[in-house]
Image: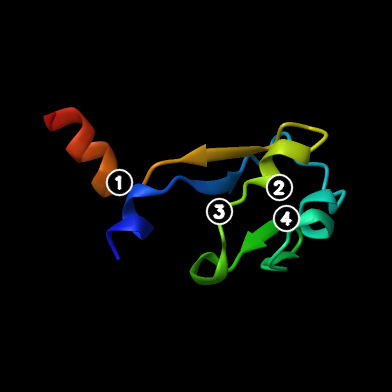
Amino acid sequence: RIFRYSTREPFVIEDKCTKCGTCAKVCLSKVITLNPYPKFKRSRCIHCYCCQELCPQDAIELKRSRIMEVIKKII
């Protein structure tokens, strides 16, 4: 379970996103839908980060969970 909190999660930067759907097409676990911007079913994400790596607009950013950000500041 700790893995879920320590892994970075993909988030869409809507100002950069052109809703091209590349992220959904390349998603190995098929957890991304366009509505109109990409939405992630995070519980099924395998954290391969293909969506972030292949986004032509660099509109997907990887963020740590809030819990991990707090822990990072403490350490």
**Mark 3 Cα within 10 Å, few/some/many (few <14, many 20+)?**
some
Q: Is residue 55 above or below residue 30?
A: above
Q: Nearer the viewer, mark 1 or mark 4?
A: 1
Residue at the location (71% across, 47% down)? 51
Q: Relative to residue 55, is residue 6 drawn left or right?
A: left
Q: CA distance from mark 2 to mark 1?
A: 22 Å
Q: Amino acid at mark 1?
A: Arg
Check disc 4 and report its element: helix, strand or loop. Answer: loop
Per the rendering, the mark at residue 66 is: 1
Q: Is residue 2 above or below residue 70?
A: below
Residue at the location (84% across, 58% down)? 25
Quadrant location of residue 71? top left
Say whether disc 1 or disc 4 marks the residue closer to the N-terminus.
4
Q: Nearer the viewer, mark 2 or mark 1?
A: 2
Q: Which residue is under mark 2? A: 51
Residue 13 position within the rendered picture, expressed as x and y whole percent measured from the top left: 63, 39
Say whether disc 2 or disc 4 marks the residue closer to the N-terminus.
4
Residue 23 position within the rendered picture, expressed as x and y whole percent measured from the top left: 77, 51
Q: Which residue is under mark 3? A: 47
